[in-house]
Image (cartoon, rainbow, N blue to C red):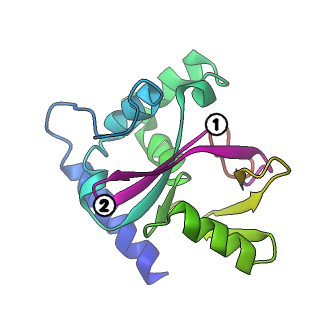
Amino acid sequence: MKKLILITFIVLGCLRLHAQAPTDTLLSAPKKELSTFIKIINAAGLKNIFDGQPITIFAPDDEAFSKFSTQNIDSLLTSPNKSALISTLDFHIVAGKLTAKDIAKAIHDGGGHATFSTLADTKLIAKINANRNIVLLDGNGCESVIKVFNIKQGNADLFIIDSVLLPKNKYF
């Protein structure tokens, strides 16, 4: 719990640093696949998120966002919806650095499932599916396959996933 509070203060501190002009936050990630995610991070004012405590980010690719209407995404990017936007991002962030090996080991040690707490204080369940992919299950039971592993981004380990993660009964 103390770690969650600390991370929350760090994220809120990042929000105060967003007065600079918007820039791409991701250094070595495939920007073409993550253009919507980059736009969302910048709109949330979290472009300095890669400068703080160690975190793991499960970043939905553009195809994942294409499952939602453009109107819903554009609405989320407006100033009045900034808190909802930040909450949505928090569903994709876990405190501490995790590698693919760490996740696989946690799944093995957990008897086939591992549970990770997000900054939104929700749970993500990780498991291995029939195709031997690591998948994440959100609060709605939706599965998101990890497509790209272990992209180093400053203080973060970034994973590219194929679905947007949402907590139970929350949709945008």
Q: Which residues are magenta?
A: 136-162
At label 1, counting other C-alpha atoms closer than 10 Å, the crowd grade (few under 14, some 14-19, many 20 or more) is: many
Question: Seen from this angle, which residue lies furthest top?
Answer: 70
The image's mark for residue 37 is none
Please provide percent x and percent y for residue 138.
71, 52
Q: Is residue 139 left or right of residue 48?
A: right
Q: Is residue 54 left or right of residue 20?
A: right
Q: Main secondary structure of the magenta part?
A: strand
Residue at the outermost right position: 130
Does residue 152 belong to the magenta stretch? yes
Give 152 or 93, whichever is nearer the viewer: 152
Kindly state the secondary structure of the residue where label 1 is placed.
loop
Q: Which residue is nearer to you in this view: 92 or 26?
A: 26
Q: Relative to 103, is 114 on the left or the right?
A: right
Q: Could you tell me if residue 35 is visible in this image?
A: yes
On the rendered image, what quadrant is the C terminus found in? top right
Image coordinates of residue 152 in percent, x first then y, are 36, 53
Q: Nearer the viewer, residue 10 or 55?
A: 55
Q: Amino acid type of disc 1? A: Asp
Residue 85, compared with residue 74, is above or below; it is below
Identity of the residue drawn at 53% across and 26% down: 62
| Label annotation for residue 155 | 2
Q: Which mark is residue 162?
A: 1
